[in-house]
Amino acid sequence: MAEEAEAASGAEKRDGEPKESKEEEEEQVVNPWEVAAKPGGKIDYDKLIDQFGCQRLDESLIDRVHRLTGRLPHIFLRRGVFFAHRDFNEILDAYERGDKFYLYTGRGPSSEALHLGHLVPFMFTKYLQEAFKVPLVIQLTDDEKCMWKNLSVEESQRLARENAKDIIACGFDITKTFIFSDFDYVGGSFYKNMVKVAKCVTYNKVVGIFGFTGEDHIGKVCFPPVQAVPSFPSSFPHLFSGRENLRCLIPCAIDQDPYFRMTRDVAPRIGYHKPSLIESSFFPALQGETGKMSASDPNSAIYVTDSAKVIKNKINKHAFSGGQDSLEKHRQYGANLEVDIPVKYLSFFLEDDAELEHIKKEYAAGRMLTGEVKKHLAEVLTELVERHRAARATVTDEMVDAFMAVRPLPHMFN
């Protein structure tokens, strides 16, 4: 976070066994802890779909979402930000029959402030919750970050609550949303499911999926079941008691796919539906599309704590441009939109489809300059960040406690 893949021969592969390719492994690395394109390149999502064995999200599914919900699909769907899936069609089949499902997503709280890339899955999940009128569980993996980032237990817990405030500020419905941290919630039925999953996954299997080595401590090897079992409704008896057949849909970035390949492989063996996934591409760094943004480089990202002045300066100084290196050349050849980061950021956050297409057309033709595009992007992002910051300022510790309280949600399907 974050199946039925088929082998080249046409035989069905198990979900935990992505297609092997030495070439792909050498060229790009995509796993829950590292995302890197080949040197000088960018992430090849077609190869990633083939390697992981998921499916491309096509227009027919997007049209079906429109028809079933009666709402215009989110821009992240219309513009291909969420581009891959596992059995999303089965979720839509169930919904069309009148069956219910729930959403599960999460956040690894490793930093005080979120950047815009962190907001993407939550913005999309909020849309799904509203469009389908379904409950949502949000996992804060404070235990994971304690183990991977060498944070203290106390610091991990503190960051989880701070990140929860940013998540709540996205506008989730408290009558349909349960946020939990692993340190606080794991136990009881949740832990029983963890043990069931752990018994089904061999050490060799988990090494093959996640690439653990003999230098990794055993906490890392034991963690995957923790992220797996929110996929199963019985992990939340206060919410879904008597609804053990409920399906789960997981919106996440595609680097979380290994967790849920493992989960989908195990689920039928312990009596559950395989969770369905809808997976996004990565929000690029300001410097270009070589991978995810780096928390160690504050100039690689726009943070929700950045001021208007900082946002403007970061965009002007660090956002990689596809414009030409002289005005004369730019007027003649236009901008290369394939590499231009300001245009890519506008594709994520500029709501108006017609306005976006106008900018792309004029910029590609050389009639619009890089400075104009960057100025427009700074305005769009400043408005987004200031709106988020104002919403977060209203989130109190009492509101965090309310979202994280273990409680029934009697109106979660209304």
Image: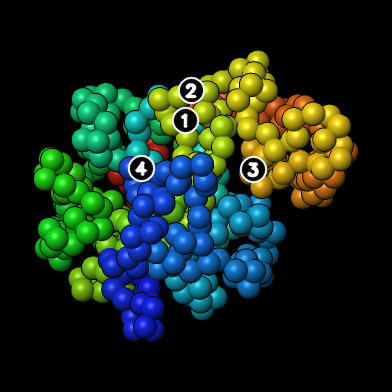
Instruction: Decide if residue 97 is on the left or right side of residue 276.
Output: right
Residue pointed to by mark 3: 339
**Alpha carbon distance from label 3 to label 1:** 24 Å
Query: Residue at image x 23%, y 68%?
Result: 266
State the residue position of label 2: 298
Question: Identity of the amino acid at label 2?
Answer: Pro
Q: Spatial distance from mark 2 to mark 3, Cα to Cα? A: 21 Å
Kindly give the residue lying farthest to the bottom in the view shown: 10
Amino acid type shown at disc 3:
Val
Quadrant of the rendered image containing residue 398: top left
Q: Mark 1 sits on what residue? A: 114
Residue highlighted by disc 4: 34
Q: Amino acid at mark 4?
A: Glu
Instruction: Residue at 36% x, 77% y: name it.
Output: 7
Q: Dot 4 lies on which element?
A: strand
| Residue 154, percent from left and from top | 23, 24
Asked where in the image residue 78 lies, by quadrant, the reply is bottom right
Q: Residue at x 52, y 47 (%)?
A: 42
Question: Depth-wise, is mark 1 or mark 4 nearer the camera?
Answer: 4
Instruction: Residue at 44%, 71% (x, y): give it.
Output: 87
Q: Could you give the CA–CA distance between mark 1 and mark 2, rounded to whole angstroms?
A: 11 Å
Q: Earlier in the sequence, mark 2 or mark 4?
A: 4
